[in-house]
Amino acid sequence: MRTYATAQQTGTDPVQCDATAVHTAPSGARAYVLLDGIGRSQGIREWTRTAARQVARAASRRGDAEAGLRHVYNRYAAERAVHGSGPKAAAVVVVTAPGKPPTIAWCGDSRAYSIRHGVAHQLTADHNLRRVYPPCTVFPEGGNRNRITSCLGSTATDQDVMNVYGHPAIEATTCHADTHRLVLASDGAYEPHADAGRDLASELVGLPGEAARAFTASAVHRAAATTRALDPNRAYADNATVLVADIRP
């Protein structure tokens, strides 16, 4: 039985610019990748799909999420330093490798979660202005969560981003190497549930395919309903993409 699945909803955007990819190396290392393309064009859609596959291959072959993401990040940065700017995407990658704890790396605000015993644990920390300017008494909402501070396709180095925003261009961590449900999600998938105060673990039950389809469909429904309540003439829902994988040591 396949132990992972992905699902996407375009929402009210004209083009689906998110992408996922999974690649397993001969070593047995497997990379799970989700990219949230920035923009709404066919060109961005195609670039994001290609970049997701590149990150998945690079990360699985190196057996490490950060090494793979940095390889592709640095290659695009070098190309664009010469030829100019191009498409960008928020990226998150998780690698499982035999005998090692899963590794996680990201740039942007796509997230990774681990669900254990019915509880969702966020593994990533968003690269956006809300992280830079957290909610406070004077500004309850904090910084703009839709303004990301790092992304794949940027030419900024770790130190460049650190100097401006206080975090590196790419961050990485590990998680426990036990049985759990791994979830990668774009902001269009997780934000509507979080805004509604929903428990993410309860929204991701069932087989991976069932959970992924239900999660993205309800995310789009909730986003559209929320914006329609504010303005009956304008219902908006972002691209929503999720990858759900049941991980076993």
Image: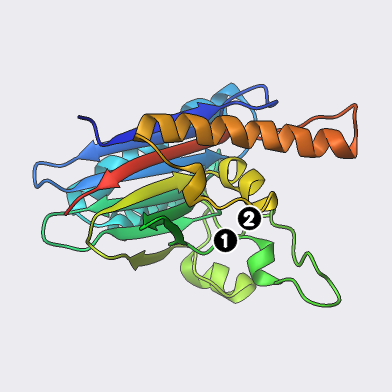
Q: 165 or 126: nearer the eye?
A: 126
In this rendering, would 100 be left or right of 74?
left
* Mark 2 neighbour class, 10 Å CA radius: few under 14, some 14 to 19, many 20 or more: some
Which mark is on residue 71?
A: none
Placement of the N terminus among the 4 image quadrants: top left
Q: Residue under label 2, please give it.
A: 148
Q: Are marks 1 and 2 in contact (CB under 8 Å)?
A: yes
Q: 80 or 189: nearer the eye?
A: 189
Tell me which colouring the rendered structure shows.
rainbow
Residue at 52% in and 64% down:
125
Residue type marked 2: Ile
Residue at 45% in and 34% down:
212
Residue type marked 1: His
Instruction: Estimate the x, y position of residue 103 in percent, counting from the top left.
Output: 29, 60
Instruction: Estimate the x, y position of residue 141 in percent, counting from the top left.
Output: 78, 64
In this rendering, would 77 be left or right of 143?
left
Residue at 47% in and 41% down:
35
Placement of the C terminus among the 4 image quadrants: bottom left
In this rendering, would 242 be left or right of 72?
right
N-term mark: 1 or 2: 1
Say which element carries label 1. loop
Which mark is on residue 127?
A: 1
Work out whether 174 lies above or below 220: below
Work out whether 19 lies above or below 161: above
Say which element carries label 2. loop
